[in-house]
């Protein structure tokens, strides 16, 4: 069954216009919107700014995580995953947080098998959050 592309309405919040971008699994949304709304005190512009900063910072930590996993450095893997987990918890990026938590736990147990798959899942989840920072016209053409 083909999935229809969401169409934005002109008066709606661009963050809530694209529900298909907020879930990689039916049970795991990309963002906890309520948490983000509370953090930004309902200021939609500030929500966008918070998400943009989160994505930018997380991309840097993701590079560190990628390098740590490639070299099987459990200490650095745990540290980078911990930083991503904390930042994602702050903005309500629940899918990113869940995956970072798994990687952090694996590194703490010195068991990095399967971490490449988790890293790919983390990158996908972060990409979904990044798409939410685009203007509606940018998302519909992405």
Image (tube, rainbow, N blue to C red):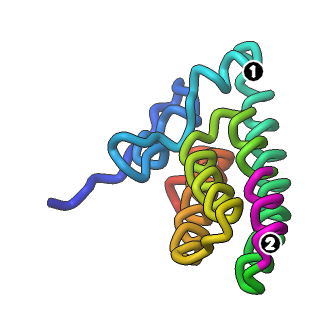
Q: Taking 79 as reference, is 3 left or right?
A: left
Question: Magenta part of the protein: which range?
Answer: 73-82
Tally the marks: 2
Residue in the picture at 84% in, 68% down:
76
**Of the residues under marks 1 and 2, which one precedes in the sequence?**
1
| Disc 2 element | helix
Foreground tag (1 vs 2): 2
Q: Residue under label 2, please give it.
A: 63
| Disc 1 element | helix
Residue 6, percent from left and from top: 38, 46
Query: How many neighbours does mark 1 have within 10 angstroms: few (below 14), some (14-19), or many (20 or more)?
Result: some
> Seen from this angle, which residue lies furthest front?
109
Residue in the picture at 62% in, 63% down:
106
Q: Reply yes or no: does residue 121 show up in magenta.
A: no
Residue in the picture at 62% in, 41% down:
93
Q: Nearer the viewer, residue 69 or 133?
A: 69
Residue in the picture at 79% in, 77% down:
73
Q: Reply yes or no: does residue 79 show up in magenta.
A: yes
Q: Nearer the viewer, residue 64 or 127?
A: 64
Tell me the CA gap for discs 1 and 2.
27 Å
Q: Is residue 11 above or below residue 117?
A: above
Residue 58, percent from left and from top: 78, 56
Q: Main secondary structure of the magenta part?
A: helix
Q: Nearer the viewer, residue 78 or 137?
A: 78
Q: Residue under label 1, please give it.
A: 39
Q: Is residue 92 above or below residue 71?
A: above
Residue 54, percent from left and from top: 78, 46
Q: Specify whether residue 111 is in view.
A: yes
Query: How many neighbours does mark 2 have within 10 angstroms: few (below 14), some (14-19), or many (20 or more)?
Result: few
> Dots 1 and 2: beta carbons under 8 Å?
no
Q: Taking 56 as reference, is 29 left or right?
A: left
């Amino acid at each position: 069954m083909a999935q229809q592309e969401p169409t934005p309405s002109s008066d709606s919040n661009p963050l809530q216009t694209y529900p298909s971008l907020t879930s990689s699994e039916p049970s795991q949304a990309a963002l906890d919107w309520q948490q983000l709304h509370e953090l930004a005190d309902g200021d939609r512009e500030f929500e966008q700014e918070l998400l943009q900063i989160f994505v930018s910072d997380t991309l840097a930590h993701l590079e560190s995580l990628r390098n740590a996993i490639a070299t099987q450095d459990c200490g650095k893997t745990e540290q980078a995953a911990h930083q991503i987990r904390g930042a994602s918890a702050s903005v309500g990026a629940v899918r990113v947080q869940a995956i970072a938590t798994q990687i952090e736990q694996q590194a703490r147990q010195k068991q990095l098998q399967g971490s490449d798959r988790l890293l790919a899942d983390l990158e996908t989840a972060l990409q979904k959050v990044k798409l939410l920072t685009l203007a509606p016209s940018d998302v519909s053409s992405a």
